Image: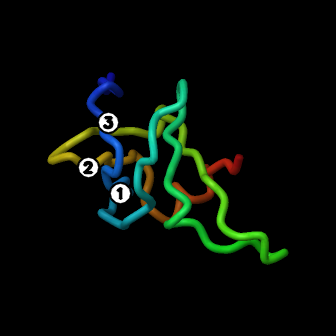
């Protein structure tokens, strides 16, 4: 079990394959809220939205980075929007 209290703001979130998934804004309950900077603008042109990753996807926290158990491409399919 990973100690989510070790997750720091602005930590990089990477997939199991080392691919950049996002940057931590902060932890909300059992989800990591990612910064808007890593999110694309929506189809309706309304701007980026925060995305969330379940802490259940975290494999490890190492060298200040949050490593997920899923590859980067797979992890984004699990993201939730606000």
Q: State if disc 1 and disc 2 touch (CB < 8 Å).
A: yes
1 or 3: mark nearer the eye:
3
Residue at the image point whose x is 32% and y is 48% from the top: 67
Q: For numbered disc 1, what is the local secondary structure? A: strand
Q: CA distance from mark 1 to mark 3?
A: 13 Å
Q: Earlier in the sequence, mark 1 or mark 3?
A: 3
Residue 7 location (% of width, % of height): 32, 36
Q: For numbered disc 2, what is the local secondary structure? A: strand
Per the image, the residue denoted by label 2 is 65
Up-down: is 44 above or below 66?
A: below
Up-down: is 46 above or below 50?
A: below
Q: CA distance from mark 2 to mark 1?
A: 7 Å
Q: For numbered disc 3, what is the local secondary structure? A: loop
Q: CA distance from mark 2 to mark 3?
A: 8 Å
Q: Earlier in the sequence, mark 2 or mark 1?
A: 1
Per the image, the residue denoted by label 3 is 7
Mark 3 surroundings within 10 Å by alpha-carbon count, few (fewer than 14), some (14 through 19), many (20 or more): many
């Amino acid at each position: 079990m990973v100690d989510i209290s070790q997750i720091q703001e602005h930590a990089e979130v990477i997939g199991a394959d080392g691919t950049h998934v996002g940057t931590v804004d902060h932890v909300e309950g059992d989800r990591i809220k990612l910064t808007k900077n890593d999110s694309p603008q929506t189809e309706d042109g309304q701007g980026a939205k925060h995305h969330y990753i379940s802490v259940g996807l975290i494999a490890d926290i190492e060298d200040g980075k949050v490593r997920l158990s899923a590859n980067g491409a797979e992890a984004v399919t699990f993201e939730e929007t606000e």
